[in-house]
Image (tube, grey):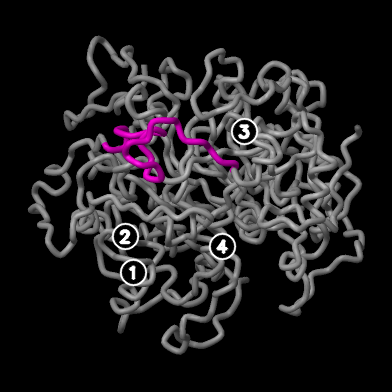
Amino acid sequence: MDMKIPTADINVGHGPPTSHSQIFYTEHIRKDSLSPLGWKDSRRYILKPGDFLDHSTYDGVPDPAQEAVPDESILGITHDKRNDKFYLGGTLSLTSQPDNQQSHPSSHIYDPYPEYNSKEWRRTWQGEFLPCLGPHGQYLDRTRAEDMVQVYKGKQKGFPNPSFGSYEAIGLDGNVCTDRYGRFGAYGHDWAGGNDVPGYHRPVATLWDEVNWGDLQTKCFERNMNRYLPEHETETTKQMKLSSKTPISREKKPSGRTQSNDPNSLRYHSRSAVIIRGWHNMDWTPNDYSYIRSLIMELSLHSGAEYEVFLLVHVLDDSIPISSDADIQRLKETNIPDEFRDITVFFNNKMLEDWYPKIVEHRAIFQHFQPVQIFSQLFPDFDYYWQFEMDSRNFGHMYHFLDKAAEFAKEQPRKYLWERNAYFYIPGFHGSWSSFSNMVRSKMIGKDSVWGPIPAQGMQPLGPTPPVPSPQDDDFEWGVGEEADLITFLPIFDPENSKWGFGKIIYNFPQGTETPRRTSVITMSRVSRKLLALMHDSLSTKGQAVVSEMSPATWALFHGLKAVHVPHPIYIDGQWTPKELDKIYNRGPPEKISGNPDSVWEYNLVNRIMYRISFMYSSQTSEDLFRRWLGYKPSITQYTDGSRHQDPEGLFWYDGGLLREETYGRLCFPPIFVHPVKNTDEELGPSRPVHGFSD
């Protein structure tokens, strides 16, 4: 029987189904396309965020009022001890299971998507959602296990709490966990494995070499394009390289679709490009394949094209020609896996020089946003541009993570926003996000606060004007419901008087090092089209720039655009207490946290902690967590000249952590965004996650 496709008048969400939708799926989806659970059982195995609440607690967080903080001379040293509780657990020791559990628990399909086409959804959004074709040649079905991430209820018993950020603060579901099979099984993880896996059913194998992710994303957008407001209607097809010349202005073709200013009218959904940065001669591991597939499935295809995923690939050798279609095709065939060739966009330094001749610096470490700015000029049909790196991973569902990050940012008021942004939010010390915000509010009484734009000399701000002259006249109303032009995953601070190593790298500003600026370490972020256009204009016309990690935050400051640091859950593999961490990481007056010479961002200041953080510019813990979670034992080949890696302070950085699957089952982690992860193959390669160490 031919499979009929769900039409838009049917609720394809997965709350209590209407009789219409249940009958439709029962009658019209082929039985051989269902998960091994079968149709009758599938709905009770589906979890949406909030369906399960884990009320267990980890008692390892001390009471801040009772804990003593070591003297300054030994700050950060006393509690420099590993926390084995990350690894002393697994799928056989979950908080959702009784202590005497004998059988392996069952996983659940995880569905964090909106109830597309429901009555409530239709009251907000224009257009209609239509499911998209997946890599198996069938239309995706969120009740089918082979199309979805699978999770377990609860988390490992005794699993530590986040040190920075929290699930509750940003609305992220921390009540479930994933093992390696549930997280990446739908994307090819261990599909060739011959052994049975307790609690997991292997999907039918997919011929990945025959999948064209670019074509699938294009078709998905075409099916759902009535949901989106076309900013530029052109006849051109997408280029697979960044052009060496600026684009010719094209007259917009009227589409008949406009966004109403009436807040009660139906809205067109925004679209976001997701840019994954890579290089032409990178070695692809099996997990790299699974990672990119997961991003496309979770962000683009399941959402009906709310996102589109690209690989932005740096051709490191400028002698390699990329000027013609034949050059591009040859480079793809040589370096890019078949399935990803149509989502790959190449660039080289020569292109950056052609676009930005008024600045001499084009190296990625100093000007990481140059190719993203150009990308936004050549691919202008997106409202936002997320940038991620190939060495980041997320144990949780990416759609849920990005959706909650954007939602949190949207709801933040402008009052004291720049000041809140500079802090590491430490729930064990600050309490709830509301308590933390009130603390900042009380400390800012009588202090100067950023309110509106702070432009550089000679620059005309183009952002919104504050509705009242002073923040004292605002009751935390301005900015609530306003989308953020910049979202970062680490604090945004003022580097002017700090010892952060890149804080004085400024190009062609008349004020020099007195130019107002902000920065957020690590360039993974969401930047709006508007903000990228302002950065591009300054660089192309005047050669004005700052170092990579200062770029979007500084232009947001210049123009009074909304920038938000999202306090996602970040873990530390150590015994440092919340009170101790606050003393180390939140130094300075409230209007300038981390903006003075004692800032934690001084390189090498507290590496014994920095390198044990799950999301940081350099970290051993991020890779330890991911490799143990993949089931890899600590490597026995991690030596250089017969000794383990050691830094100048005598600290060792090597593949660590425990693996006790025979006792606890497979490691099962809650949603955690980790960086860096340099080695996703079982055998360690030459790169190391801590800067300065490589074989």
Q: Which amino acid, mark 2?
A: Pro
Which label's residue is closer to the chain start, 3 or 1?
3
Q: Which amino acid, mark 1?
A: Phe
Alpha-carbon distance for marks 2 and 1? 8 Å
Q: Which residue is mark 3?
A: 292
Q: Which residue is mark 1?
A: 436
The secondary structure making up most of the magenta span is loop
Q: Which residue is mark 2?
A: 427
Which label's residue is closer to the chain start, 4 or 3?
3
Alpha-carbon distance for marks 4 and 3? 24 Å
| Left or right: 389 in relation to 643 | right
Alpha-carbon distance for marks 3 and 1? 36 Å
Q: State whether residue 534 is above or below residue 332.
A: below
The dot on residue 226 is none
Classed neighbour count for the residue bearing mark 1: other residues with Cα under 10 Å, few (<14), some (14–19), many (≥20)? some
Q: Which residue is mark 4?
A: 407
Which label's residue is closer to the chain start, 3 or 2?
3
Identify the residue at image location x=44%, y=31%: 677
| Left or right: 329 in relation to 162 | right
Question: Is-magenta flag for residue 574?
Answer: no
Residue 635 position within the rendered picture, expressed as x and y whole percent measured from the top left: 34, 17
Q: Which amino acid, mark 4?
A: Glu
Q: Secondary structure at mark 3?
A: helix
Q: State whether residue 460 is above or below residue 135.
A: below
Residue 361 position within the rendered picture, expressed as x and y whole percent measured from the top left: 53, 41
